[in-house]
Image (spheres, rainbow, N blue to C red):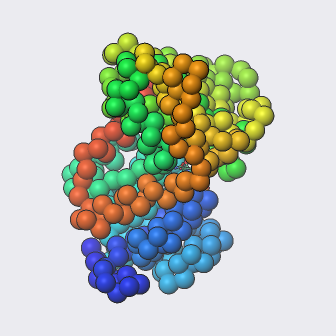
Amino acid sequence: MSGASASPQGAQALPRIGFLGTGRIGLNRMRALVDQGLVEAAVVSDPSAEMVRAAQEIAPDALVASSFDELLSHDLDGVVIATPSALHAEQSIKALERGLPVFCQKPLGRTRDEVVAVVDAARKADRTLGVDLSYRYTAGMEQVASVVRSGTLGQVFAADLVFHNAYGPDKPWFFDKTLSGGGCVMDLGVHMVDLALWVLHFPEVTSVTSQLFSKGQPLAANSDTVEDFAVATLTLATGAVVRVTTSWHLHAGRDAVISADFYGTEGGASFSNVGGSFLDFEARHNTGTQSRVLSQPPDDWSGRAPAAWAASVAQGGRFDPAAEQFTAVADILDRIYAR
Ligand SMILES: NC(=O)c1ccc[n+]([C@@H]2O[C@H](COP(=O)([O-])OP(=O)(O)OC[C@H]3O[C@@H](n4cnc5c(N)ncnc54)[C@H](O)[C@@H]3O)[C@@H](O)[C@H]2O)c1
């Protein structure tokens, strides 16, 4: 553990962080943390020289490690992981076993078992574990969660969550199940399952049914082909129903369709993207045919999840039992995949 480095103001030591994997999302989150002055990007590591150069543009003083072991040999206060999904669990556990807090991209693991192993390692090491379930941190979802939890909607009996990415992923590894863990459910559904459970305070889920497709054809359970369209229905112990629909490459007529609607006996709360955007969201409180805006763009949310983790590292980086929620989400994904 370090704690010796000084912030630009010279007043307070910034956590010294190692960044493992500086591809598309790794660079985005690294920039968010560095630009907000929340961490010192001490070491970076990525097998791609191009990606290392891009990381050095954000943090010119960062050291470059040629392997994860080399990165871990430096004096660090935490590790940010943004590698292909198959590596997340193993790499997270390795860092945690060294006593380092971890912020990992979603999915934390490809299966519930992998996620349980990471959460166990964090608990044992008493180190904070963050996962980039970034939509929780949008102003819109915070408003929706607040309205649902306030009881204003009465008894919430249904939720409908959608994430269509009309482009699909841009890297081949997403389409290899051993590297990604799955298709659009693993990539996008993880966010929507998390949002549903998080808003509703992680209720007991009594049954999960699902239908997965690839190029319009239904997929058999445990198919090696990754799904590009999926519908899952979760029944909660309260009797409420949650439907999650996700896809890649859908003829959606826009870049993305992202929404989370919660329906109660006294009203509804709705989160939806604006104009097909991946970044701009609106939240509304609906009563009958009336609709009241709760939040609108702009909202610079993408760096908030890593910022929250960095704040917990700065405060000692001890284990937060809320990490158990990652297991609850992974459990539902396993059930959607009928594992
Ligand atoms: N939170 C979100 O909303 C969100 C959004 C997009 C992607 N993601 C997740 O982020 C992860 C990365 O996605 P991406 O789109 O940035 O992919 P990417 O392919 O652009 O980046 C992955 C990077 O990891 C590097 N890498 C591969 N093996 C490595 C290793 N052993 N050690 C260090 N680096 C290694 C690659 O060279 C690449 O630069 C995925 O798991 C994805 O699901 C999360």
Q: Position of residue 104 (x, y in %)?
A: 43, 54
Judge whether 190 appears above or below 307 on screen. Answer: above
Residue 211 versus residue 79 in the image, above or below: above
Quadrant of residue 150 within the rendered picture = top left
Residue 295 x %, y %: 53, 44
In the rendered image, which quarter contains the N terminus? bottom left
Q: Is residue 336 above or below residue 176?
A: above
Q: Is residue 315 above or below residue 289?
A: below
Q: Which residue appears at 28% of the width and 77% of the height? A: 2
Q: Is residue 182 visible?
A: no
Q: How many marks?
A: 0
Instruction: From the viewer's perspective, tell me whether residue 119 is left or right of residue 20.
Output: left
Could you tell me residue 114's position as x and y percent? Answer: 39, 41
Regarding ligand 1, which quadrant of the image does it lie in?
Answer: bottom right
Hey, which residue is sitting farthest top in the picture? 239
Indicate the quadrant containing the C terminus: top left, top right, bottom left or bottom right.
Answer: top left
Q: Residue at x 37, y 40 (%)?
A: 326
> In this image, 318 relative to 331: left or right?
left
Q: Nearer the viewer, residue 274 or 250?
A: 274
Task: Name the residue nearer the viewer: 91 or 275.
Answer: 275
Residue shown at 44%/24% (left/top)? 335
Horizontally, residue 12 falls left or right of residue 141, namely: left
Which x, y percent locates residue 100?
A: 30, 64
| Residue at the spot 37% in from the left edge and 20% down from the top edge | 154
Q: Is residue 150 left or right of residue 179?
A: left
Is residue 314 at all visible to an observer of this figure?
Answer: yes
Q: Nearer the viewer, residue 9 or 309?
A: 9
